């Protein structure tokens, strides 16, 4: 890897790490300025907007990146790719708003009936859609400086808003949620004009080939990737939301669960990078029909996951309670067995990344999406019906992750009857 490639990778990775760190820091600041119920509501919003936003719209970014890069290679205009991006984004945004509307009773309990929960989450979804719509063409044209700037601006906007709210002693939950919801719009507002002017230097006068919609043939692939990402995010984000909605009479306990759940899901932030590293290797093995190499690689990665998983479970049980008290000011934390099972669920999810990457490499995004949808269904069903709520959410997340791993394992052993449409990849 040459110096330029290394620098670009570091630039993009650091901006995304900064955004994740900024969000955690905003939650830590909020924990010192909101009561337990308000903090649980803000944390639930953060998890929900990540489920809808990162889950759905990053799939469009990936497909747009591919289509724009392809246009650059052939010296074509990126107009068709941009139009397909807008259309896909609008379709997925409509779906997100329908989900928000249908989930209003649950959202009102989790976010507080007086916060205008559905409206705030809809605002967050629109903001996420705008930011990802901006990023696809930038990545496709390899304008990584501007691309990274979108994450830096979003992280700075959220952090500045949190500091201002804290300095002014604002303790209304709605204000904190609104600040978090609007942060992605800052990047779109500041960089929107510059991003719209980015074009391939080789693009010539539009030809007949340029008028072909690059999204028309892969439309199903985009939507399956979106379903995969949405369900994957749901498995890691919805357990705290379910607890918050069911423990409105015990806000301190709900806030404690949210805090440890958010901390124990930290490795999930690395899942996209893991897949990005594994996908080329699995693609090469699948393309050459080297099944023995697939099995060998799967076994080695599985053993690595088990070793790292033991360490993570120990970290979760020993250190997470201390961090939740020190950083987030949690007054109540769940029993250690809850922390242990949540940590185990994250390890199981990491193992599922192996099978997911294999299916994506084999152009089977629908099969991978089905596994995560099944896991999400288990989480929601158990999280809503079992009692007590903490046990329900903990077992729901763990069993949901196990279901994903089992389904992926079974599906991988059954070759697809017909090839599925190509996909640009997916992340949890």
Image (cartoon, helix red, strand yellow):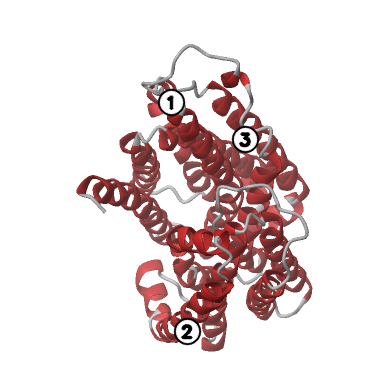
x%, y% of residue 404? 67, 71
In the image, which disc is placed on residue 13?
Answer: none
- The span from disc 3 to disc 1 (Cα, nearest Å) is 16 Å
- The residue sitting at 42% across, 38% down in the picture is 139
x%, y% of residue 322? 38, 79
x%, y% of residue 127? 53, 37
SS of the residue at dot 1? helix
Q: Is residue 133 above or below residue 397?
A: above
Q: Quadrant of the N terminus?
A: bottom left
- The residue sitting at 45% across, 36% down in the picture is 135
Query: What crowding class fits label 1: few (fewer than 14 Cα within 10 Å), some (14-19), or many (20 or more)?
Result: some
List the residue tagged with mark 2: 303
**Quadrant in which residue 24 is drawn:** bottom left
Q: Quadrant of the C terminus?
A: bottom right
Query: What crowding class fits label 2: few (fewer than 14 Cα within 10 Å), some (14-19), or many (20 or more)?
Result: few
List the residue tagged with mark 1: 192
- The span from disc 1 to disc 2 (Cα, nearest Å) is 45 Å
Q: Is residue 406 above or below residue 86?
A: below
**Quadrant in which residue 276 is drawn:** bottom left
Q: Earlier in the sequence, mark 3 or mark 1?
A: 3
The answer to whether marks 1 and 2 mark residues whose Cβ atoms lie closer than 8 Å is no
Q: Earlier in the sequence, mark 1 or mark 2?
A: 1
- The residue sitting at 66% across, 61% down in the picture is 368
**Quadrant in which residue 263 is drawn:** bottom left
Q: Nearer the viewer, residue 236 or 358?
A: 358
List the residue tagged with mark 3: 89
Decide if residue 350 is in sight here: yes
SS of the residue at dot 3? helix
Query: What crowding class fits label 3: few (fewer than 14 Cα within 10 Å), some (14-19), or many (20 or more)?
Result: many
Camera-side mark, 2 or 3: 2
Q: Earlier in the sequence, mark 2 or mark 3?
A: 3
């Amino acid at each position: 890897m040459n110096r330029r490639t290394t620098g670009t990778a570091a630039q993009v990775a650091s901006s995304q790490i900064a955004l994740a760190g900024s969000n955690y820091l905003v939650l830590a600041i909020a924990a010192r300025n909101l009561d337990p119920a308000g903090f649980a509501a803000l944390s639930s919003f953060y998890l929900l907007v990540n489920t809808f936003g990162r889950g759905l719209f990053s799939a469009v970014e990936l497909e747009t990146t591919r289509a724009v890069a392809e246009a650059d290679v052939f010296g074509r205009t990126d107009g068709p790719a941009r139009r397909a991006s807008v259309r896909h984004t609008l379709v997925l945004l409509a779906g997100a708003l329908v989900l928000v509307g249908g989930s209003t009773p649950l959202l009102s309990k989790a976010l507080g009936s007086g916060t205008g929960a559905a409206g705030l989450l809809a605002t967050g979804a629109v903001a996420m859609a705008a930011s990802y719509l901006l990023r696809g063409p930038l990545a496709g044209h390899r304008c990584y400086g501007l691309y990274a700037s979108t994450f830096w601006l979003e992280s700075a906007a959220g952090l500045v808003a949190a500091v201002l709210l804290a300095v002014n002693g604002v303790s209304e939950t709605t204000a904190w949620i609104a600040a978090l919801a609007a942060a992605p719009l800052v990047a779109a507002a500041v960089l929107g004009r510059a991003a719209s002017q980015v074009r391939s230097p080789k693009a010539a006068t539009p030809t007949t080939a340029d008028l072909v919609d690059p999204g028309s043939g892969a439309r199903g692939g985009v939507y399956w990737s979106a379903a995969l990402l949405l369900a994957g995010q749901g498995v890691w984000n919805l357990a705290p939301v379910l607890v918050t909605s069911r423990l409105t009479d015990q806000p301190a306990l709900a806030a404690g669960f949210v805090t440890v759940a958010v901390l124990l899901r930290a490795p999930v932030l690395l899942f996209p990078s893991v897949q990005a590293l594994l996908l080329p290797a699995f693609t090469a093995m699948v393309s050459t029909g080297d099944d023995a190499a697939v099995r060998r690689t799967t076994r080695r990665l599985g053993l690595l996951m088990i070793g790292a998983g033991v360490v993570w479970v120990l970290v979760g049980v020993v250190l997470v309670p201390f961090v939740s008290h020190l950083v987030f000011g949690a007054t109540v934390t769940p029993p250690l067995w809850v922390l242990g099972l949540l940590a185990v669920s994250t390890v199981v999810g990491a193992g599922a990344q192996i099978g997911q990457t294999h299916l994506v490499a084999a152009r089977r995004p629908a099969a991978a999406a089905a596994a995560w949808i099944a896991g999400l269904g288990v989480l929601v069903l158990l999280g809503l019906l079992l009692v007590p709520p903490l046990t329900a959410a903990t077992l729901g997340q763990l069993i949901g992750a196990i279901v994903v791993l089992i389904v992926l394992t079974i599906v991988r052993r059954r070759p697809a009857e017909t090839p599925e449409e190509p996909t640009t990849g997916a992340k949890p």
